[in-house]
């Protein structure tokens, strides 16, 4: 994903579609990370 951002910034291509896809990827990754962290905490608490 970082390489895609580098390509986007270095190529000076500011297509709305490309930016929307990149932002969508960031949101999905962050959501997955927080869901993974909350699932890990939920497994440890019942003990």
Image (cartoon, rainbow, N blue to C red):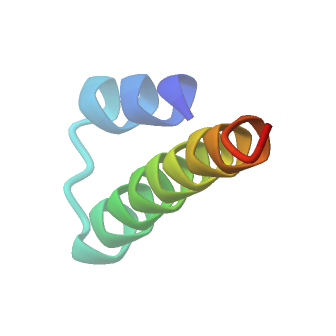
Which residue is farthest front?
A: 47
Where 17 falls versus 4 (above or below)? below
**Residue in front for this viewpoint, 10 or 36:** 36
The location of residue 28, given as percent across then percent down, is: 52, 61
Q: Quadrant of residue 19?
A: bottom left
Q: Quadrant of residue 22?
A: bottom left
The mark total stands at 0
Residue 20 horizontal side relative to residue 38, left or right: left
Quadrant of the rendering where the N terminus is positioned: top right
Where 45 falls versus 19 (above or below)? above
Q: Which residue lies at the image location 19% right of the left edge and 56% below the top edge?
A: 14
**Residue in front for this viewpoint, 6 or 39:** 39
Q: Which residue lies at the image location 35% right of the left edge and 76% below the top edge?
A: 17
Residue 17 horizontal side relative to residue 12, left or right: right
**Residue in front for this viewpoint, 12 or 2:** 2
Q: Which residue lies at the image location 67% right of the left edge and 46% below the top edge?
A: 36
Quadrant of the rendering where the C terminus is positioned: top right
The location of residue 30, given as percent across then percent down, is: 45, 47
Residue 19 horizontal side relative to residue 25, left or right: left
**Residue in front for this viewpoint, 8 or 28:** 28
The location of residue 44, given as percent across then percent down, is: 74, 35
């Amino acid at each position: 994903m970082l390489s895609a951002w580098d390509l986007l910034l270095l190529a000076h291509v500011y297509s709305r579609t490309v930016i929307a896809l990149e932002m969508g990827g960031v949101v999905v990754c962050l959501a997955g990370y927080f869901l993974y962290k909350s699932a890990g905490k939920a497994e440890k608490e019942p003990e």
